[in-house]
Amino acid sequence: MSLLVKICGLSTRETLEVALDAGADMVGFVFFPPSPRHLSLELGRELGRQVKGRALKVALTVDADDATFDNIMDALSPDIFQLHGKESVARLRDIKQRFGRPVMKAVPVEVAADLAVLPGYAAVADRILFDARAPKDATRPGGLGTPFDWRLLGNLELKLPYMVSGGLHAQNVAEALRVTGAGGVDVSSGVESAPGVKDPEMIKAFIRAARASQELSVR
Ligand SMILES: O=C(O)c1ccccc1NCC(=O)[C@H](O)[C@H](O)COP(=O)(O)O
C-alpha cells in the first residue's frame, strides 16, 4: 500500500496549489479559532473548490458541536473529519452516523499508557493519527512542531490504517517511518517559515523526502 502524505493547516491558494502539485494525498484544513491556521468558512469553501479531487480534503476540528460540523459540511464537503480533541468513542460513532464521513481520530502520545485508548477508538474510527501530546498549557492540542518517542509505536498491533505526526520535517520523516511503520505521515509546522505560514520549498522537500523513504521501504 503506498504511503499517504498529508500537508495540514493550509490556508492560502498558493501553498495549497504547491501541495497539490507536489503530490500530497491529503490536504488538511483547520477549523479551530485559536490556531494560526484556522480558516473561516468562506476561505474553507474557496480552498475546497480549488482541490478539485486532486487530494482528500481533511477537515480538522477540536471537540466541535454539530452546528460546526454542519457548517463545515456545507462549506468544504470534506472527505474525512479529523477529530483532534477529547471526543469519546460514542461521539465518533455519532459524528459518523450524522455526517456520513470517515473519521480520523488523533491520539496524543507521550507515554506507552497513552495507547490504552486505541481498542475503543479502533472499533469506530476509520484511521488513527498519532500525534505528540500537547503540553498542559498549550493553546491547542496539535500543530505544535514537537515529536513524540516513535519507539512507542514500535510494537503496535493495529488493524486500522494509521499516520504519524508531530514535529515531522524533511530531515526526520524517513526515520519516523522506519521506526513506526506508519502508512502515512502528516506535517504542519515542519513546512512553515513561521506559525501558520506555509513555505512552498519546505512543502516540496517534505513530500520528496517522504516519497524517497517509501521507495527505500518497498525494495
Ligand atoms: O495545526 C494546528 O494548528 C492544530 C490546531 C488544533 C488541533 C490540531 C492541529 N493540528 C493537527 C495536525 O494534524 C497537525 O498536522 C499535527 O498536529 C502535526 O503538527 P506539527 O507538529 O506542527 O507538524
Image (cartoon, rainbow, N blue to C red):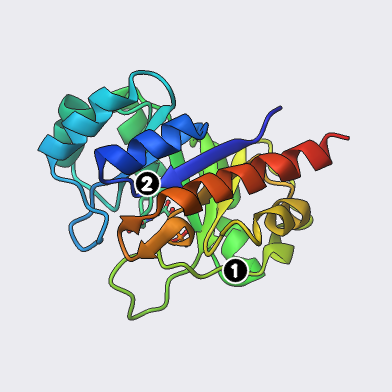
**Picture quarter with the C terminus:** top right
Q: Which of marks 1 and 2 is nearer the N terminus?
A: 2
Q: Which image quadrant is residue 91 in?
A: top left
Q: Work out whether residue 103 can be spotted.
A: no
Query: Which residue appears at 71% of the width and 53% of the height?
Result: 174
Residue 83 is marked as 2
| Badge 2 density bin: few <14, some 14–19, many ≥20, Cα 10 Å | many
The outermost residue toward the right is 219
Image height of 158 relative to 73, above or below: below
Residue 21 point in image, percent of width and height? 46, 30
Q: Name the residue under label 1.
A: 148
The one of 148 and 167 positioned closer to us in this rendering: 167
Query: Which residue appears at 19% of the width and 45% of the height?
Result: 65
Residue 139 point in image, percent of width and height? 28, 72
**Picture quarter with the N terminus:** top right
Q: What residue type is labelled 1?
A: Phe
Query: Which residue appears at 26% of the width and 37% of the height?
Result: 13
